[in-house]
Image (spheres, helix red, strand yellow):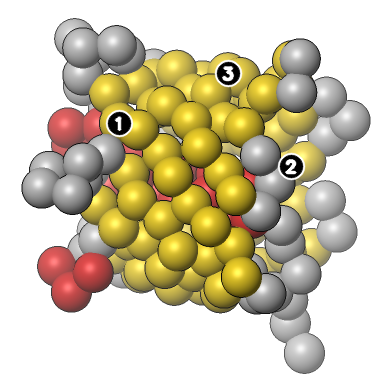
Amino acid sequence: MEDLIKGRLGGADGYDIRCAIEGDKIVGRAGGKLHGKDIELEITERGVQGTVGRESVKIELEAGELRGNVGSQKLTLRGVDRVTGFFGEPIVGWNVVAQQQGEHLSGQLGSTVLGRIFELELGSAPGWVGTLVAIVAFYALEPRASVSA
């Protein structure tokens, strides 16, 4: 049986996420065949690197936090199964909160009014990996996520 991260970002009006876990690589797609982006991430000794669509993802572990960039946006994440952090710039950015229970991850990007919820089945992946996949999908598919202030 294939090990997958799959679920939805944004509820009924959101996007599907489906990625295969192949060793240290996460390969898949956010969105559909026409309006979607490929996700290719690799977990390294120092963090995570890869691409979403044509944008680069480079995040490194520093002082117990994952810090780096998804495309043009800054990202900071803390935690393993209870993940918190911030994505974007101080003026135009999104708080990140997610909680893993078994193989299920529930989370929120941004506020309850303007934010996006996400629900993912993680397979064997830890919560921080699922949270990162949701953030990468959000960046790829939400026009407001990739705009610089």
- Position of the N terminus, as image quadrant, is bottom right
How far is the residue under mark 1 from the one under mark 2? 24 Å
Residue, disc 2:
42
Location of residue 95 in the rendering, given as x and y in whole percent from the top left corner: 35, 33
* Residue count near mark 2 (Cα–Cα under 10 Å), binned few <14, some 14–19, many ≥20: some
Does any portion of residue 39 appear in the rendered image? no
Residue 69 vertical placement versus 31 (above, below): above
Taking the spot 36% from the left edge, 69% from the top edge, the residue there is: 8
For badge 3, the amino acid type reads Gly
Q: Is residue 124 left or right of residue 119?
A: right
User: Which structural element holds mark 2?
Assistant: strand
For marks 3 and 1, give the CA distance. Answer: 15 Å
On the rendered structure, is 9 left or right of 128? left
SS at badge 3 = strand
Q: Earlier in the sequence, mark 1 or mark 2?
A: 2
Amino acid bearing label 2: Glu
Quarter of the image with the C terminus in it: top left
Residue 61 in which image quadrant: top right
x, y percentage for residue 42? 74, 42
Q: Earlier in the sequence, mark 3 or mark 2?
A: 2
Of circles 1 and 2, the one toward us is 1
Q: Secondary structure at mark 1?
A: strand
The residue located at (67%, 74%) in the rendering is 102
Mark number, residue 94:
1
Q: Relative to 84, is 16 above or below? A: below
